[in-house]
Amino acid sequence: MPKGKGGGVKSARPGGSIKSRPMTPEEAQKLCLCDAARYGELLEAKTAGVKALLADTMPAGAPFAVYESPPTEFRQRCNFALWHESEADGTIHYVMYDPAEDAPHGNRTPLRVDTFPRGCARTQTLMVGVLAALRRDAVLRDKVRECRFHTTLRGGALVLLAYNRPINGDAAWKERATALARELGEDVVVVGRSAKVRVSVGGDEEGAPLVRETLESGGRETTLAQLEGEFSQPNGRVCEKMVGWALERTAGSGERDLLELYCGNGNFTVPLSHNFRQVLATEVSKPNCENARQNAAANGRDNVKLARLSAAEAAQALAKARQFKRLEEAGVDLSTYDLSTVFVDPPRAGLEPAALGLARTFDSIVYVSCNPETLADDLA
């Protein structure tokens, strides 16, 4: 689904030649709105497209299940650029850009976001409160260029404000941001970012730059810390269904072990560990690897080991082509594993060649994909 693009967006100066404008109905439908009345029709068309894409790789008669998303208010992560229309009266807007617009990046038309029903109900409420604060408070508004919202189904929320000016050591900014966090809610963290600097205030854990989510799948609850700036599933309801599907697919595997590549914050790792004797999960991001380790411990999963390895490095380690001190530091002895299943949830680009080669050596592959086209390529 489209989302606001803030990277590299500079704040407009009063009197600049580029002005924001309201979206046309067609632009709003493309970028912000939900056609809830046609959801079933659109889902059916998308399902048909995926089936056609996978027709050459799916065995005849293979089961094909469809899991619905909420038709509106489904996103827990939303990003918007901020456009300064006039500093004289504090006019500032959330904006998005039409990716189809044929114009250089710096000359694209900022399209105002007045409502965003794809965002969850709490995100929409936070959007109103944050924009009101920016419009009335010159300190918070000064050179702010982007706003990100990270909410949860059953936990707190995080608001990030990115700046084109330094905020480290800015006592006035910290004071106003702390007041904003209190105004938005006792479980809301406000994070400020500028070049190589992150300042966070508020929230249940007093400034910790994260939210805690509780997901329900397979009759169990899993509580996960989700870090600011690191990936987490943006649609919590669909995430619960994906985890439930993965649990069903791996039922009866309790005598053998699981390898997981691209484990992120442990979103799948923790619940899947109930289905296996041991789990070896790998993740290249150092913050997310440590976060996944803490999430496993917080949920009492002592059969999980986390190793900071890329998919290519995991393939090298399992082939005994290279030894890694990071495995030793994580307490991993590969000789103790009986790995029968590999679980992968790769980025949109799909599996890298080393990961693809490694996956083909397993008895069972469980693949979660956010891009049917690369999934089709990987299955070919």
Image (cartoon, rainbow, N blue to C red):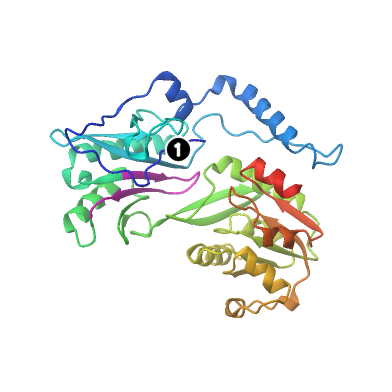
Residue 283 position by quadrant: bottom right
Q: Is residue 218 left or right of residue 35?
A: right
Tell me if 133 is positioned left or right of 330 in this view: left
**Left or right for 316, reference 127:** right
Q: Position of residue 18 (x, y in %)?
A: 26, 31
Taking the spot 56% from the left edge, 19% from the top edge, the residue there is 37
Can see residue 275? no
Q: Position of residue 158 (x, y in %)?
A: 38, 49
- Amino acid type at circle 1 is Lys
Disc 1: which residue: 3
x then y, percent, for residue 80: 37, 39
Q: What is the magenta range?
A: 146-165
Along the horizontal axis of the image, is 58 left or right of 139?
right
Q: Residue at x 64, y 60 (%)?
A: 261
Residue nearer the viewer, 314 or 353: 353
Q: Which quadrant holds residue 185?
A: top left
Relative depth, front residue between 350 and 173: 350
User: Residue 183, image x and y in percent?
Assistant: 27, 44
